[in-house]
Image: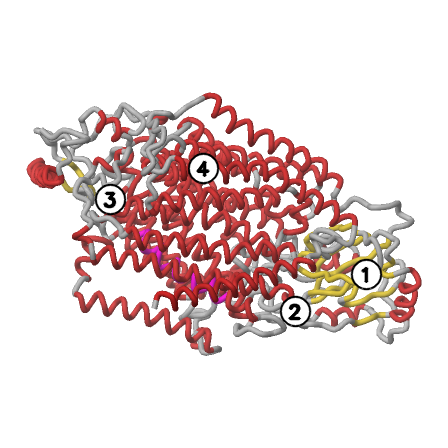
Amino acid sequence: MLGKLTFDALPFYSWVAMGGAAITVLAVVLAILAVTWLGKWRYLWSEWFTSLDHKRIGVMYIILALIMLVRGFIDAIMMRAQQAIALNEGGYLPPEHFEQIFTSHGTIMIFFMAMPFLTGLINVIVPQQLGTRDVAFPFMNSASLWLTAAGAGLVGISLVLGRFSTAGWTGYPPYSGIDYSPGVGVDYWIWALLVSGVGSTLTGINFITTILRCRAPGMELMKMPLFVWTAFCTSILMAFAFPALTVAAGLLGLDRTLGMHFFTNDLGGNMMNFANLLWIWGHPEVYILILPAFGIYSEVTATFSKKRLFGYRSLVYATAAIALLSFTVWLHHFFTMGSSPNINAVFGVATMIIAVPTGVKIFDWLFTMIRGRIVFHPSMLFTIGFIVTFVIGGITGVLLAIPPVDYLVHNTTFLVAHFHNMLIPGALFGYFAGVQYWFPKAFGFKLNQFWGKMVFCFWIVGFYLAFMPLYALGLLGMPRRLEQYTEPDWQPFLIVAAIGASFVLVGIFSVFMQFYISIRERNLNRDLTGDPWDGRTLEWATSSPPAPYNFAVIPEVNDIDAFWAMKQKGKAFLCHQHYDPIIMPKNTSAGVLVGLFGFLLGFACVWHIWWLALAGVFGLVVVITVRSSQEHSDKVITAQEIRETEQKRQAVLLSADKTVNNGSLV
Amino acid sequence: MKSAGVICLSKWLINILTIALLTSCSMQSSPILFPKGPVTETERELLFLAVLIMLSVLVPVYLLTFWACWRYRASKNNCYRPQWHKDWRVELFIWAGPVIIIGIIGYLVVVYTYRLDPYRSLDNRANIFRVQVVAQNWKWLFIYPDQGVSVVNELAFPSHRPLSLEITSDTVLTSFMIPALGGQIYAMAGMKTRLNLESYKPGHFIGRNTQFSGRGFPKMAFDVYAMSPADFSQWLEKVKGAKKVLDVQQYQQLISSEKGHPVEYFSAVEPELFNRIIAKYTGKGRPLPLLKPDNLE
């Protein structure tokens, strides 16, 4: 009846496992109790969970990302603590925990922290920057969110029932095959990826369509804000790269569940094919994570230098070039597999070519700052911190792209340091900058800047302390994923890295402290105009938070930096006499149900509960069919309602006296 | 109160500085920065060269960043040009600069990738010293086909001859590396990869698996001894005097999982053992019987 699921799946095998399970269960129970006590279930359900509003979906993505950031960071600091004391069989973590922890850290940070974070930011901002009211497929958007949440749920429940994979976030076979990993861990990993991967693919398709089809009149491709361009390239990468991951994970699942031999040692299996498929997704994935951050840095630099973006065309072409080239370099992740020098040289050179457009971008941001008026808002601090730190990562990236150098430092902590050097300043700092920058747009009040600066300071100091020693350790020959070691020379570096991790801990604390303080002081920091930073792009033309329809009247775009141009011409904040009714999608519970059935399907396949798997598939088919054939999935917002909303906004604008400098009110 | 905080902070700083000093001293033991053979030395030369070339980007970017932040800070109001957004000279510079640097390093990549191809033999066939390597859970088996002996977790070879390794795995994908002598290469079941290394002079090094392969991974390291000819013959005599012989039966016993396996000598080896291990997974030739691993989790 319950397949492989028995009482043995409960985490009574060790204190660490029980602790993890207890904290997970406790957190869920507390959250449920808190919502119940506050009586907010109906509100959450009708205003958030079932909402098809792209802004709310975006916010939910970001909340998921922040929760998973904490979860992934707990893994990280546990590993740092272990390695700091693990000389000569010291340490507090047995290998079976350490292995699960490094696997879940990587899986969570990539799939359930970074992916939802960037998807959330794109969701909140891109439609507004395009001057449109919604994404192309609002229901699909909600389904993507809940599928991602379902994947995160599978990783979460693996703490309580069964164990997680020990094969690392890349899950290389044959180790991840059924012969060497007979438990359910790898299956959890596979199904978390498959379920959330479908969500990511759909998000990609959704935003390609939105950006190509839903732009405001006059917004040519070469007038789109840089963040839209990077979101566009990222969406293309999502739609084209994720299928490779789905195939790789799917075939591995067939090997494990149905006894096939795609990647096994024997009977014609070939583990090298998995490495190829995984990295055909995996390398574009790096740019999926980084490109949106590049877009945010572009917006932030222009706004806080009070200056038009330097070399807009260069930046667009560089972005597109990076997206294209990202599909041509996957082999550099396994130069050491024994390919001929012809192949290694070609992929080495191809990899370096990516450094050219990336370098161009760095200089474009610098030249945007030059001759500007730089304001050191926290988001700008993140941008500057990114530039100086990312350059180091770029250099070590070029080093790793030289095959003979890669032979020396591949699989060592040098590699670990390199990709954290790309993804923390390159992606995460960008997302943080985005939060600092766009928070008032989403919630109507500004974030506390002091705590924003604290977030920056602790993260950047923590980053250097945590990862520079890992570069050195790589040169000392320390492999990654080591649960214990016997070289006393390594320990001082690992202690410094652990200190760095504790700085990052304070950084994460500051993130939440900033939210807490800002919410408490929200009445002091209201953003009445919708344009708190004297912004340049269309998202600042809406109120903060925007009305459900974003724009009562769709704006006409004539320039790059459309909103800036409107302010210059005195056409921003215009009051319109006539409003047309607006059709928006109704809320629907179908998205939540898609996620729920996706979760059940994944969970059932992990534990071989086949009736439940069938029920999951059946549920998915029914929900999607019913929702797709609904005739009345839209609601109409009447002209009268719009007029009332807009008149309120005009009153607020008048009180904020926005007429003087930047626009005229009629 | 405040001064207490400052004292606390300065204590922390001193601690961090002390650790930094200690760490920089321990870089002396880096097998990559202080190579013991020509392969690592050339690879290191390439590493340094590439870093030097790229410093020509790093330094200007740093200077430009801090200069721009200082000079164009809002409170200063220096030379504000809000519409300055393109300049073909700047664009030329920011595209051409990276192109030139990547061009130079790209050239180095091509040249050195061929020169440092791990499959390339370092000497003529007569002079190279052959060893066959088998990765197991969680130990390394070294077969000396020309000497007819075999050793677990210890690799000895005469330092005046280049080492030519043939590598396979009788378990999951692993990666063989002796950082002081050269880079790494994957060991994969049913396949044979090669690595050519050389030591300048007699010495003791550490080799290990760098690819996570399960519970015993942290201990999957071995001692490497480059020996003078006399020392090597002595060592060979010692191995040849061992009681155990690595026949098929003994081999099947050896591969059952074990963590931290001690060094073990076998005075004789089943002929063609290396190829028969590969054949287990390809099914070609005369395969050894295939044993599925015991439950590893």
* Residue type of the residue flagged with mark 3: Lys
Image position, residue A362 (x, y; %): 47, 36
Residue at x-position 65% and y-position 60%:
B25
By what rule are the colours in the image chosen? Answer: secondary structure
Image position, residue B88 (x, y; %): 46, 21
Q: Which chain does the numbered disc 4 sit on?
A: B
Return the residue nearer the eye: A356 or A447. A447
Instruction: Characterize the magenta stretch by its predominant secondary structure.
Output: helix
* Residue at numbered disc 1: B203
Q: Are marks 3 and 4 on the same chain?
A: no
Distance from the alpha carbon under mark 2 to that under mark 1: 20 Å
Mark before the other along the chain sequence, 4 or 1: 4
* Residue at numbered disc 4: B67
Q: Which chain does the numbered disc 1 sit on?
A: B
Mark 1 and mark 4 in contact (Cβ < 8 Å)? no
Give residue A441's mark: 3
Return the residue nearer the eye: A197 or A323. A323
The secondary structure type at the circle numbered 1 is strand
> What segment carries the magenta color?
A61-79
Q: What is the quadrant of the N terminus of chain A in the image?
A: bottom left
The mark lying in front, picked from 3 and 1, is 1
